[in-house]
Image (cartoon, grey):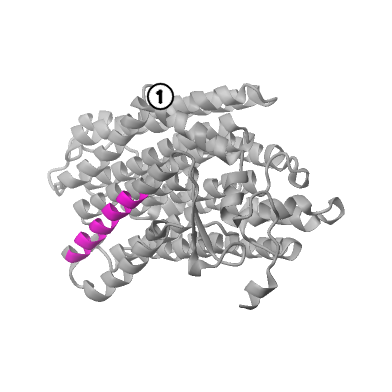
């Protein structure tokens, strides 16, 4: 058992209250502590990912209580990849927040930022469904505080809507957990993977209901149609660095679906047969179409990016819904791409806001400050999100189309993906034309206040995210090879189960003596 596995949870959990207590009135000290914490998290995440790269599965038992009685954290290829992606994203988001001054526009930004990281990283590492619920609530509370950072009526209204929708998801999550525990007597995911297979065919009603409820909960987190209503307003009204960090939060829902429905409710399990292709795939295809139509119809840049996130999540969920190793590998490759691209576009939209003096309306206005560099960054971000060559979005879609060829729904998937890609290209081209091309023909009024040029550190943060996208493209072969190994590990879960339960090939049973102790 390695103690480093709990560090991504403990470090931000300790750093956040320390920032509040020791540096509440010193924004400079807060920035140093927060940056140092994120850099330390990147180092820890990289080491954990390196350890898991050869297939090693790492276990941490809190209080040295063995599963399924104690709380466990599990580090495998999938969880450590998501932890590394989150921490790297957090670094560039934090640099942007500092460079743009967003962190100084309200109280406790850095403390809430650390609590948010604690919730996200804990959700990726936990090996227990109840603690997945706990970490969902931690990130929900922190994300609400970040969403209303700097105040404003519209932001507060969007924050309330965001909390209400997610509280509905939390309630459904508790119902699902209750049903699962009533049927199996455990909430440890490795233990459930064995116990669910032993439920008799006559007693599967509770398990079926729980599986559906869990899918609904994770679909809410992933903003899957028709459970996506909270996302456009919430992400559009949130401060840009917060919205950029939220790009990983929808991936928490996708991660949960991958983990639960390959480990506990795999496609071959008769109890949940047909749940994936009969409900998840159609909803995902509609999400792709609706998201890209929203990109074309958006009247403001921040809402365009929010709908692009819905469309990209739909693309991820199409891949996941196929539940084959090839499709899951493609989904994981695309998750990395869409997280970086979505975050970059949210930050670019803030560069546009700063250069235009606060306006994000997709109408022709006088040229903005720093237009040339901002336009170049927008062009690169739009190419990435629309899935045009040569960036990784194009390769991710090719992987999806290739994985779909062996399915009966191949024609439908190809049609939706290709048509929605065309629509998104038109939407981003329209937005770029209004923001940058037509601006040259507009003369600024003499009494118009000059807009400020975005800070160099803000440009550096956005450039860093786009550079990571370029690296994700250059090393696409190695990246896809690694995601293929992750998918293979997911579809052969026995080593995971054996590591967690420490009883290879056997069903864990309660030990009365240990329980009494």
Residue 54 point in image, percent of width and height: 45, 38
Residue 400 in the image: above or below residue 249:
above
Q: Position of residue 348 (x, y in %)?
A: 29, 41
Q: Nearer the viewer, residue 494 or 90?
A: 494
Vertical arrangement, residue 486 with respect to residue 452, above or below = above
Magenta span of residues: 29-45
In the rendered image, the residue lying farthest to the right is 202
At 21% across and 38% down in the image, what residue appears? 366
Q: Nearer the viewer, residue 79 or 176?
A: 79
Neighbourhood count class around disc 1 (C-alpha, 10 Å): few under 14, some 14–19, many 20 upward:
some
Instruction: Specify the principal SS of the magenta part.
Output: helix
Q: Is there any visible trace of residue 367 in the rendered image?
A: yes
Residue lying at 26% horizontally and 60% vertically, measured from the top left:
34
| Nearer to us in this view, 223 or 407 | 407
Relative placement, left or right, of 122 versus 193 is: left
Report which quarter residue 299 is drawn in. Answer: top left
Query: Which corner quadrant of the image does residue 267 belong to?
Result: top right
Q: Position of residue 315 (x, y in %)?
A: 53, 35
């Amino acid at each position: 058992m390695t103690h480093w596995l709990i560090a991504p949870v403990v470090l931000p959990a300790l750093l956040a209250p320390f920032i509040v207590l020791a540096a509440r009135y010193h924004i400079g000290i807060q920035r140093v502590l927060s940056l140092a914490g994120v850099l330390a998290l990147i180092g820890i995440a990289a080491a954990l990912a390196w350890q898991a790269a050869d297939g090693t599965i790492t276990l941490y038992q809190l209080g040295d209580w063995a599963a399924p009685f104690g709380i466990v954290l599990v580090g495998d290829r999938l969880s450590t990849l998501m932890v590394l992606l989150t921490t790297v994203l957090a670094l560039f988001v934090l640099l942007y927040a500092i460079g743009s001054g967003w962190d100084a526009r309200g109280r406790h930004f850095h403390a809430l930022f650390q609590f948010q990281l604690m919730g996200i990283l804990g959700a990726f590492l936990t090996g227990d469904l109840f603690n997945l619920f706990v970490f969902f609530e931690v990130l929900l509370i922190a994300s609400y505080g970040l969403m209303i950072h700097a105040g404003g009526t519209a932001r507060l209204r969007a924050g309330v809507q965001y909390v209400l929708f997610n509280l509905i998801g939390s309630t459904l999550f508790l119902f699902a957990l209750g049903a699962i525990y009533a049927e199996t007597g455990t909430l440890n995911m490795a233990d459930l993977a064995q116990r669910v297979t032993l439920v008799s065919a006559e007693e599967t009603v509770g398990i079926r209901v729980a599986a559906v409820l869990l899918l609904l909960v994770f679909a809410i987190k992933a903003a899957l149609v028709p459970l996506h209503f909270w996302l456009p307003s919430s992400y559009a009204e949130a401060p840009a660095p917060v919205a950029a960090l939220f790009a990983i939060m929808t991936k928490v829902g996708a991660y949960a679906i991958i983990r639960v429905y390959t480990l506990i409710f795999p496609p071959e399990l008769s109890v949940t047969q047909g749940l994936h292709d009969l409900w998840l795939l159609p909803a995902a295809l509609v999400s792709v179409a609706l998201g890209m139509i929203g990109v074309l119809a958006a009247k403001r840049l921040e809402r365009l990016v929010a709908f692009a996130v819905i469309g990209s999540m739909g693309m991820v969920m199409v891949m996941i819904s196929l539940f084959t190793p090839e499709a899951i590998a493609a989904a994981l490759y695309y998750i990395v791409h869409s997280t970086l691209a979505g975050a970059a576009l949210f930050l670019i939209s803030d560069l546009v806001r700063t250069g235009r003096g606060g306006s994000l309306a997709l109408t022709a206005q006088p040229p903005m400050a720093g237009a040339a560099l901002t336009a170049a960054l927008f062009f690169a971000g739009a190419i990435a999100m629309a899935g045009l060559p040569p960036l990784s979005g194009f390769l991710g879609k090719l992987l999806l189309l290739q994985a779909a060829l062996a399915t009966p729904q191949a024609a439908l998937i190809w049609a939706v993906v290709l048509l929605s890609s065309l629509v998104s290209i038109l939407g981003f081209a329209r937005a770029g034309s209004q923001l940058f091309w037509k601006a040259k023909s507009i003369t600024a009024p003499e009494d118009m206040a000059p807009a400020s040029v975005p800070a160099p550190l803000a440009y550096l943060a956005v450039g860093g995210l786009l550079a990571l996208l370029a690296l994700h493209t250059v090393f696409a072969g190695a990246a896809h090879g690694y995601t293929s190994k992750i998918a293979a590990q997911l579809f052969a879960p026995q080593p995971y189960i054996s590591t967690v339960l420490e009883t290879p090939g056997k069903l864990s049973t309660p030990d009365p003596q240990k329980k009494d102790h």
